[in-house]
Each structure stands twice: as structure tokens, then as C-alpha cells.
Image (tube, rainbow, N blue to C red):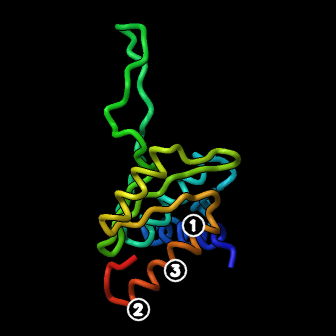
Amino acid sequence: MNALAELCRLSLERKRERYPNVPPHGIVAPKLSDKDANGLTRCILEYFRLHGGYAVRINTQGQYNEKLKKWTKSTTRRGTADVHSCLNGIHYSIEVKVGRDSQSDYQQLETQEQVEGACGRYYVAQDFQSFYDWINQVKYDYQEEGTHSK
């Protein structure tokens, strides 16, 4: 199954439910892509929202302070994943890495271990299909076991 096509279908279906007075031809189909990090992040956020979960993108970069004329450090903890979400009582931290991008030591050695040590789920998403396959397996395992085990 093409996960991206399924996500677009579900998103369009949700739009039609949300705007019942708009004729079907008047609702614009979503344009979702996982070709770059921003697109993949949007797809992941949309997945959680469409499945009744909560999801937020975490901005970990600093900001430029115009008054000081310099960049200030972020107050977000170093190594924090790009997406934090909750679905069916399970916390998910998703790190988005597209192309040649890879996890930093902080992300891999500290954050991932801490999230998993607290019975949360951590995943490095490189494309939407692999994320979709992973999250559906995690949900299936959870339903089968009825516990929050890894």
C-alpha cells in the first residue's frame, strides 16, 4: 500500500466531513510530499492528527535577536526530536532525517535512550512509507500485548 496516497485520501475525506456544505469538486485535495524534511514532518503531523492523536513540531534552532544583532540559543533541550506526539496513551518522539542527514550523538545516545527508557517510542523517519509501516506495527503490537512494552 502506498502510505502517502492513503494519507492524502484520509486527509481529503476529513476535509469533506469538516465542510459538508461544499460540493466535492470544491474541496482541494491535499498536496503532501516526503521529498524534503519539512514535507515529511507535515506528513507525520497529519498522520497523528488524522488518527486522533496529538502532535507538534519542536523548533530546536536558535533565533535571531534584532535588538542584539546576534543569534540566541534555543531554550529547547539539546537533542530533542523534531516531532513530539501522543496517540492511544503512547508518547512518540520522531526525528526527521531526509537524505544524508543523520542523528547527532545527543539525539542517538541521550534523547533516544531516555525516551525509550521511559517506555516512549522513538523513531528516525527518513520517508513516510517506512514511518507508516513502523507506526502501524507499534500500534498492532500494543493492541496485541495490551501493554506499553517496547
Q: Residues within 10 Å of mark 3 (few under 14, many from 20)?
A: few
Q: Earlier in the sequence, mark 2 or mark 3?
A: 3
Q: Earlier in the sequence, mark 1 or mark 2?
A: 1
Q: Residue at x 39, y 11 (%)?
A: 66
- Residue 34 coordinates in the image, percent (x, y): 65, 55
Q: Residues within 10 Å of mark 1 (few under 14, many from 20)?
A: many
> Nearest the camera: 19 or 74?
74
Q: Amino acid at mark 2?
A: Glu
Residue at disc 3, secondary structure: helix
- Residue 59 coordinates in the image, percent (x, y): 42, 39
Q: Residue at x 36, y 30 (%)?
A: 74
Left or right of 39, for residue 116: left
Q: Which residue is mark 1?
A: 131
Q: CA distance from mark 2 to mark 3?
A: 10 Å
User: Which residue lies most toward the bottom here?
Assistant: 144
Q: Which residue is mark 3?
A: 137
Q: Amino acid at mark 1?
A: Phe
Q: In which image quadrant can residue 70 be found?
A: top left
Q: Amino acid at mark 3?
A: Gln
- Residue 94 coordinates in the image, percent (x, y): 47, 57
**Which quarter of the rendering shows the N terminus?**
bottom right
Residue at disc 2, secondary structure: helix
Q: Residue at x 41, y 92 (%)?
A: 144
Q: Which residue is mark 2?
A: 144
**Which quarter of the rendering shows the C terminus?**
bottom left
Q: Residues within 10 Å of mark 2 (few under 14, many from 20)?
A: few
